Amino acid sequence: MQSPVLVLKDSLTRESGSKVHHANIQASKAVADIIRTTLGPRSMLKMLLDAQGGIVVTNDGNAILRELDIAHPAAKSMIELSRTQDEEVGDGTTSVIVLAGEMLHVAEAFIDKKYHPTVICRAYNKALEDALAVLDQISMSIDVNDRSMMLGLVKSCIGTKFTSQFGDLIADLALDATTTVGVDLGQGIREVDIKKYIKVEKIPGGQLEDSKVLKGVMFNKDVVVPGKMKRKIVNPRIILLDCPLEYKKGENQTNAELVREEDWAVLLKMEEEYIENLCVQILKFKPDLVITEKGLSDLACHYFSKAGVSAIRRLRKTDNNRIAKACGAVIVNRPDELQESDIGTGAGLFEVKKIGDEFFSFIVDCKDPKACTVLLRGASKDLLNEVERNLQDAMSVARNILKHPKLVPGGGATELTWPYEAAAVAFEAIPRTLAQNCGVNVIRTMTALQGKATKDVMHATGENAWTGIDGNSGEIADMKELKIWDAYNVKAQTFKTAIEAACMLLRIDDIVSGIKKRQAPGSNQPSKPTIETEGDADNEQMIPE
């Protein structure tokens, strides 16, 4: 009899076949169950404690899963889904996890019946194609210039969030911010970069109602010499620099040998003249405010304050870019390359204000700002963090609508329009979860909803495509009347991500764990730490300072 051949080392464990499928499906369902209760307007909040003892209170799917430390590889890939969804469209992070978990749960019955995973995946992909076609049919276009319509849409998308209790506030802030930074690229394409050009500044204190979108930017800096430089300038001429206004220091140790005593004075004079020359080149353009990302020497401060120019130093690169966008200035790398066209004249007011214990510089009332700052005020840090997360989602929704002005019905109405039985059962997870979170009788509600959905034979093109669940009361209602909408590309992205992820996890049939990282050749054993004796310490070479 032939002896068994060992291919894998003893330290490796290998699982294969249906065992892996079941393990992956169970792990995915476990992740989906963690955040299932955070879907819809009646959602619950989760409190998470991190290693440093900090607290996160949120119902944002991505924020919850980001904080979790998970061991199972399939569960890890589910968490990646939520992050992808957040980066792509910024909303629907909970729906995508719930949907992917449900897709895998439905597939489990087929795997038990010995269906091959690739057959299931092929059917799912076909269902996805048809789902996207149906989405196109039931979607309706909107006018992005109709503010009340846009406001309603953003509100219905963030109605599930904690800040929905503050009414239109967050939706207003998000709309103002995104319409400010939107740039028309021609051919009907709009570019809205909310990461780069919208800064959210959180300052504890005050009321949430004091939050506003500035027509310009603010940053946490004061002028260099507060007593001598102006803290308020109307219609300032702004110069932005990316170079130090101080004497160049040597790259490393620089030795200068001075033979005569006068040479020292000459050396100092050269430094002073160099800085004076820099300042003269800047001051000939008659600026009111000079901002640099690098250092600013005392001598340069003296020349600026003498000329009545305010100066700010060591500003962040990102803040500098936002100021340039807001006031129309160009960031200059060398003062001798300055031109009149580089000077920002678009700002209406530069002012330094004290909020709490810190000074903040405001460059506001800009003519046509393409960058802005959202100033958030609130009672506590935790509240502000949650408001910021909700605001990011709201801005993402507003951006999506500006880019693709199409709507689909919300409240689980879209999910009830599929002709495939298995996929339809999975899609029903969304309206079912909404009903669960409202505390109504789930079976009765879902049966009534399915009955309404199937009354119309051509459901996708008929009126009933807008029948869904009112997330507040749990009743079946017309989504058009209640103005509960979802952005088209959020829905499309959710379906694509969920189904593709489910297919990927279904096609895994082998898990090999225990693989170690390869060590470099020759380093078989970790080197032992060497212990110095007193004798060694004396023999060491002294390193010159």
Image (tube, rainbow, N blue to C red):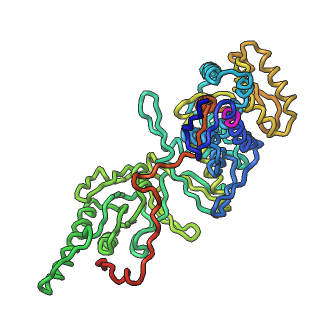
Q: Name the spot of residue 507 as percent of width and height, x first.
A: 60, 29
Give whichever of 325, 520 is nearer the camera. Answer: 520
- Figure label count: 0
Q: Quadrant of the N terminus?
A: top right
At a point 73% along the width and 44% down the height, the residue shown is 34
Q: Name the spot of residue 364 as percent of width and height, x first.
A: 47, 55
* 327 is higher (above) or lower (below) than 406: below
Give whichever of 188, 333 is nearer the camera. Answer: 333
- Give residue 51's quadrant in the image: bottom right
At a point 69% along the width and 18% down the height, the residue shown is 460
* 349 is higher (above) or lower (below) than 453: below
Q: Name the spot of residue 318 as percent of width and height, x first.
A: 43, 54
Name the side, left or right, on which 26 lies relative to 313: right
Q: Is residue 124 visible?
A: yes
Q: Quadrant of the C terminus?
A: bottom left
User: What's the magenta bit mostly, secondary-structure-wise?
Assistant: helix
Name the side, left or right, on which 382 lies relative to 177: right
At a point 82% along the width and 27% down the height, the residue shown is 446
Q: Is residue 413 visible?
A: no
Q: Name the spot of residue 213 as percent of width and height, x first.
A: 55, 51
* 447 is higher (above) or lower (below) than 523: above
- Residue 506 on the magenta segment: no
At a point 38% along the width and 83% down the height, the residue shown is 535
In the picture as drawn, the residue positioned furthest to the bottom comes out as 261
Magenta-drawn segment: 20-24
